[in-house]
Image: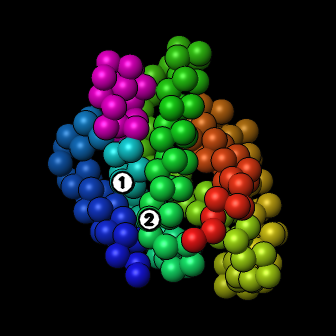
Amino acid sequence: MRTFVHRWIAATVIVSIIAAVDGGWAMKWLSLAPDRVFHGELWRLVTWVWIVRTPFTLVIVGWLLYRFAGELATHWGEPRLRSVALQILVASSLATCALAALLGTHDPHTCSSLMMVPLVILWGRQYPEREVVLYGMIPIKAPGLVRYVAGLVGLCAVFYGIYAFAPELVACALALIYPKGWWRR
């Protein structure tokens, strides 16, 4: 039942490893570079999330995808998860490109935490009675986890800038407002 999630993790690991050793080719052609999107390179709206720049982040992204996307795939079904993830990814990418045009900046983006944020939020909204343990010692109920993740994204945007965290901010907002009625299988 988790074929989509396993492929998503595998693609992220493979593309990230290639990007780490290829001398910049993957970054050049797959990252979300708004100026290149405006020149017709539309694949960048979806390919950039597969590039994770550090090994630690890659492990965390893989684990969170397995944990949260896997459970959502089991409950919602893989087609629904794929559809929701794609909607959030494309909307976040387009909003980031629009913001780049407004700000006059075209710095490229790679994965960082884009899909982790909405998946954790959607999972928390789907299973409000569940509990997770943060850092191996802090138990937190799903609604608290949703607030923690949303707050962390907001804090990162304050420290690193709105443009730097634009994709995560949009993804977070979309996951928070995504209608529960659309989740049903």
Say which of 175 and 132 sits in front.
175
Say which residue appears at 66% left-offset and 47% top-offset: 174
Q: Position of residue 32 (x, y in %)?
A: 40, 35
- Seen in the image, is 104 located left or right of residue 153? left
Q: Position of residue 127 (x, y in %)?
A: 72, 77
- Seen in the image, is 143 located left or right of residue 77? right
Q: Is residue 39 magenta?
A: yes
- Please, what is the dominant secondary structure of the magenta stretch? loop
Image quarter of residue 142: bottom right
Tell me the mark number nearer the camera, choosing from 2 and 1. Answer: 2
Q: Which mark is residue 50?
A: 1
Q: Which mark is residue 79?
A: 2
Q: Position of residue 52 (x, y in %)?
A: 39, 55
| Image quarter hosting the C terminus | bottom right
Q: Position of residue 92 (x, y in %)?
A: 55, 40
Q: Which residues are magenta?
A: 31-45
Residue 89 drawn above or below residue 79: above
Q: Secondary structure at mark 1?
A: helix
